[in-house]
Amino acid sequence: MIDQFTTRPILNSRGEWTIEVTLRSGELTAIASVPQGESRGAYEAVSVSADQAVKNILEIIAPVMVGQKLGDQNSLDNKLKESDGTATKERLGGNALLVVSMVYARLSARAENLPLWQYLRHLSTTPSVKDAQHSVSPRLLSLMIEGGLHAPGASPFQEYLVLPRTTTIIESVNIVTKLYSALRQLISDRFGPGATHLGDEGAFAPLIADPLAPMSLIMEAARVAGLDDKFDLGLDAAADNVFLSPEELNTFYDQARANYPLCYLEDPFKENELDNFASLLAKSNKELMIAGDDLTVTNVERIKLAQAKGSINAMIIKPNQIGTVTETLEAVKLAREYGWKVIVSHRGQETNDDFIADLAWGIGADGIKLGAPARGERVAKYNRLLEIEATQV
Ligand code: PGA
Ligand code: ZN
């Protein structure tokens, strides 16, 4: 039973306020905090200010929580949704609800003496995942070069990612850290040491306008490091913030696919351009993952719409786009029913909370997108993935 509940504002990785909650039950304690998005989708749950979230949690949510038993995630999340009562979580804030839902999951796992990923797996409604003792490691999507809203002035596209061609996290981390280091050297040699500054998610953000140049830099660094056949490339265009027409975007994607080993394309068009997504998917081979992020916002209504239009074959999962753990799992279940790949993701403004690493293992995610293997709030997730993998049999 929950007997103590505290909350306070803490800083996120961009020097802005977010919220942390501590929950106690007898001797057990759990802490959780929530990230925020910089390039948010229009259909995401509403996020309120940290001060407002603390007030809402203390005055409205805490009285409902104290005295609740642990381990019933579904009914807890339903209570949270009912206390808010709006479709967009605008009354209490998706951030206020999610931090409570996450800390409750973590304390419940502790009460059941389970690692968090196993607790989440038991909640998972996909039978093949639920019954598995362990799972294949999620594939890493690691950020090497960033631009867009995360590094204004650099590339117009937000994220140039690498996806190691290997089956374990440890081997993947070895590949991405070697590549990251080779890329730092290459950028320094080519543009001067001052050009190796980092964007919001820890990746390099050289001021080069040619949107294909980051891909060639990554491949050049890979050749130097002897890694050029060890990964595929991914791109999160975050197209809602890119000022190119759909025709220009299509031309760019064609060029990128013709010249680079591109296997992943996220938000290639704006969130309301479902038909443009669909045409791209229709003409692509099955190996190319076309993922919705701002398009789908971890929301079953948006997911159904994307399926009806035939827009995507992969989807980003961000719990704070929807606001509770249970609704996150419902979104995963639906995406799986549609046969889509599921990729758990961090956000632009992170905390050191590593919940998403457990979530990725728990749901047997196909991938996890974490930012660069640098900066504490990103490294926390890498390290938790490594820790979970080390415990697998
Ligand atoms: P955000 O962007 O977390 O800053 O919204 C990340 C993404 O678009 O994947
Ligand atoms: Zn995205």
Image (cartoon, grey):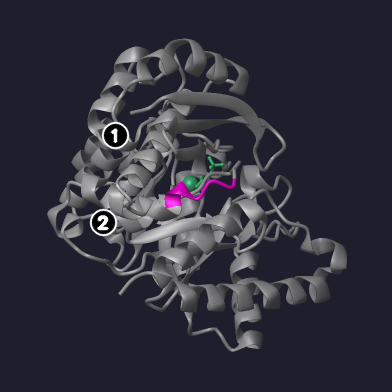
Q: Residue at x 40, y 75 (%)?
A: 168
Residue 246 screen position, x and y as percent: 45, 46
Work out how far the residue at label 1 is from the one at label 2, CA to CA, in angstroms.
29 Å
User: How many marks overall?
Assistant: 2
97 w.r.t. 137: above or below: above
Amino acid type of the residue tagged 1 in the rendering:
Glu
Q: Earlier in the sequence, mark 1 or mark 2?
A: 2
Q: Which residue of the protein is positioned furthest toward the bottom in this rendering?
A: 226
Q: Is residue 382 left or right of residue 301?
A: right
Residue 348 screen position, x and y as percent: 58, 44
Q: Residue at x 67, y 48 (%)?
A: 200
Residue 187 screen position, x and y as percent: 76, 71
Q: Nearer the viewer, mark 1 or mark 2?
A: 1
Q: Which residues make up the magenta segment?
A: 352-356
Q: Residue at x 26, y 23 (%)?
A: 78
Which quadrant holds residue 365?
A: bottom left
Question: Which of the image's four quarters has the C terminus?
Answer: bottom left
Residue topped by disc 2:
282
Disc assigned to residue 327: 1
